């Protein structure tokens, strides 16, 4: 497994290192972590290698296979390039901004999530801490379903990560005000869940009253879920992502359908 970890020299960015350790110990196959530091000018890269060497030698990365890259240029663009070159399965990075919020003008994390061809797991240090889960303790990813899906094809990037990290999935839909539509939506969730279960992943499903953020926050507080996953590219998905990320500062997996 290949995980790309962007850093910027700040303690905020380094908060991803312990979650990286937690996730890495859940993966059965050999894994390589690539630490990427992007500087705005080529001259700045001279200071990057000593910094990356220090991070590589940290306790959190002990016993992991780690390589480093020091680059100059636009951070989001170069991070996406490295992810493509490495054949990455995941980008793991920190962000303190409310991603997808038009009032903030976006963030590097948001731009990376949109331009990368692999899922991006974004941690916000001011929000919910990533749980320190032992190898064989259940890790649950809640996929927030903005719109009903005909089948599980659009969720394959998230399903793949669930397989790699030995994680369970929870499909979360939102109640509507239209008579009879809730039953239809729950049946769709059930159909998608059964398709995913064929590859050996445990899948639960839930319909929750609006606003969906209240239920997700409750699940996070009680440690019933560790990560929320939001699909990008589906009808209505970006609107749901914007609403969710304005209200909940949780470990968030953004993936393209």
Image (spheres, rainbow, N blue to C red):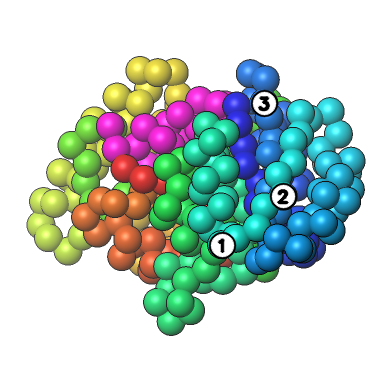
Q: Earlier in the sequence, mark 3 or mark 1?
A: 3
Kindly state the secondary structure of the residue where label 1 is placed.
Answer: loop
Q: CA distance from mark 1 to mark 2?
A: 12 Å
Question: What range is drawn magenta here?
Answer: 153-172
- Taking depth in this image into account, of 102 and 224 the one nearest to the observer is 102
In this rendered view, identify the residue nearer to me: 37 or 251.
37
Is residue 231 rendered to the left or right of residue 180?
right
Answer yes or no: is residue 223 visible.
no
Residue 227 image position (x, y, % from top left): 54, 48
Residue 209, quarter of picture? bottom left
| Residue in the image at 40% along x and 77% along y | 102
- Residue 167 lies in the magenta stretch: yes
Q: CA distance from mark 3 to mark 1?
A: 27 Å
Are dots 3 and 2 in contact, CB under 8 Å?
Answer: no
Q: Which residue is mark 3?
A: 31
Q: Horizontal and vertical percent for residue 51?
A: 85, 53
Q: Is residue 174 above or below residue 26?
A: below
Q: Is residue 128 magenta?
A: no
**Residue at (36, 32) in percent of width and height:** 156
In the image, 72 versus 138, the foreground residue is: 72
- Mark 1 Cα-neighbour bin, 10 Å: few <14, some 14–19, many ≥20: few
Q: Quadrant of residue 82?
A: top right
In the rendered image of this protein, does residue 137 appear above or below residue 60? above
Does residue 53 appear left or right of residue 1 in this picture? right
In the foreground, 242 or 46: 46
- First reached walking from the N terminus: tag 3 or tag 2: 3
Q: Which residue is mark 2?
A: 70
**Tag 3 secondary structure:** loop
Q: Position of residue 19 (x, y in %)?
A: 70, 45
Residue under the image location 30 percent in, 56 percent down:
237
Query: How would you rate the neighbour count of disc 2 (Cα within 10 Å): few for under 14, some for 14-19, many for 20 or more?
Result: some
Residue pointed to by mark 1: 74
């Amino acid at each position: 497994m290949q995980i790309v970890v962007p850093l910027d020299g700040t303690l905020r960015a380094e908060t991803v290192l312990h979650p990286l350790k937690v996730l890495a110990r859940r993966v059965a196959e050999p894994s390589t972590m690539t630490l990427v530091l992007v500087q705005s000018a080529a001259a700045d890269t001279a200071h990057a290698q000593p910094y990356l060497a220090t991070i590589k030698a940290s306790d959190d990365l002990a016993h992991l296979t780690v390589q480093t890259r020091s680059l100059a240029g636009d951070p989001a663009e170069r991070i996406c390039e490295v992810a493509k070159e490495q054949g990455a399965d995941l980008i793991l990075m920190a962000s303190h901004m409310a991603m997808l919020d038009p009032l903030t003008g976006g963030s590097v994390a948001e731009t990376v999530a949109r331009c990368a061809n692999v899922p991006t797991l974004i941690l916000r240090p001011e929000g919910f801490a990533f749980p320190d889960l032992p190898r064989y303790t259940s890790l649950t990813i809640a996929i927030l379903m903005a719109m009903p899906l005909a089948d599980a094809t659009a969720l394959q990037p998230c399903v793949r990560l669930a397989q790699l990290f030995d994680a369970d999935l929870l499909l979360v839909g939102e109640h509507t005000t239209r008579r009879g539509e809730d039953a239809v939506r729950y049946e769709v969730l059930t159909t998608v869940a059964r398709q995913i279960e064929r590859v050996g992943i445990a899948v639960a499903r839930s319909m929750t009253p609006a606003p969906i953020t209240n239920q997700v926050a409750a699940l996070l507080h009680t440690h019933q879920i560790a990560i929320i996953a939001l699909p990008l590219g589906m009808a209505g998905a970006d609107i749901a992502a914007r609403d969710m990320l304005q209200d909940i500062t949780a470990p968030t997996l953004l993936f393209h359908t």
